[in-house]
Amino acid sequence: MQVSRYAIQSVGAAVVVTLLKAVAYFLTGSIALLSDALESIINVVVAGAAFLALRVSETPPDAKHPFGHHKAEYFSAVLEGALIALAALAIFREAAIHFFEPKPLEAPGLGIAVNVLASSINAVWGWHLLRVGKRERSPALVADAKHVLSDVVSSAGVVIGLMAAVFTGYLQLDAIIAAAVGVYILIQGWGLVRDSVGGLMDQAADAETLANIRATIAKAAADGAIEAHDLQTRHAGPVTFIQFHLVVPAGMTVAAAHDICDRIESSLHEAVPGARVSIHIEPENKAKQAGIVMRSAN
């Protein structure tokens, strides 16, 4: 519930920023500021989608979804990527029109000041949201935060370009800046979709996390087990599913093997927050002398 609370706060922040950028556009008539406002409108929609996805992902496992609903978060990130692509196309269209039919800017100083205020709010909120998203391992919050911060970067480019247009009198620069914003957010959208599809396709844990898992298993299972092999991992939102085969001596009792499994699970839960561990016990004649070897089988 705490994570979804940040998502609903993100909706409020996005609405405030969008209204400020809309004011900046109406004050100046700048197509570059319009492109900036369009990107912020996407932030509002995406923040709302992230809130809904997080509420679904927090739903406890049930008979039809025994592994939980964590993948729901990835859908909001995919939606964000699609909306970014649509916004980029709209920006390209407006930029093309205004490049061949440039219009003088009205009250550029005031419009730029309002836009800087909106970007400052975005910067503070985006960094905070990114920190929370990484801490909670939430793809929806991280995607939302990255989009907000990309909005800050594109807004900075818009402001610098508009100032150059005002000082040089080259009005086509307004449309050129808008097109550049479109290209930038299109690249950001592709990155979000790529990462989210990886999650939906049960992408394995990254190399650093995998190395941590292997080291944790080796240390926790050293007293009693022979080896661990066929290690498999996958991410689903904040949860990392870990499964492997654990080889123990043939004469070991079920109780002793169960104690080793409990020790391994406890260590993995500490090393990998949100870990869901599944261990299959095997006798020593199943040893492969591969994977995570603690000692040789007899």
Image: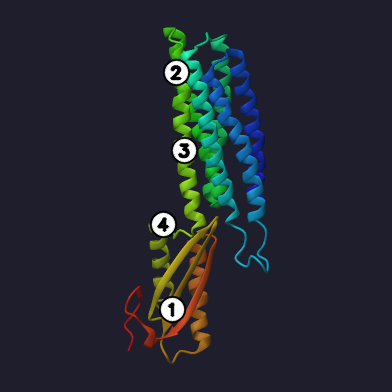
Cα–Cα span, label 1 and label 3: 42 Å
| Residue visible at 42% across and 90% down in the picture | 250
Residue 274 location (% of width, % of height) = 55, 61
Asked if one can make out residue 243 in the rendered structure from this viewpoint, the answer is yes
Earlier-in-chain disc, 1 versus 2: 2
**Residue that carries the numbered disc 3 in the rendered image:** 188
Q: Does residue 161 sit above or below 129 in this rendering?
A: above
> What secondary structure is found at the residue carrying circle 4?
loop
Residue 245 location (% of width, % of height) = 44, 77
Residue 20 location (% of width, % of height) = 62, 23
**Residue that carries the numbered disc 4 in the rendered image:** 206
Cα–Cα span, label 4 and label 2: 39 Å
From the image, which quarter does the C terminus lie in? bottom left
Q: Residues within 10 Å of mark 1 (few under 14, many from 20)?
A: many
Residue type, label 2: Gly
Horizontal arrangement in the rendering, residue 224 relative to residue 85 (left or right): left
Residue type, label 3: Gln
**Residue that carries the numbered disc 2 in the rendered image:** 161
Query: Quarter of the image holding residue 111?
Result: top right
Residue 91 location (% of width, % of height) = 52, 26
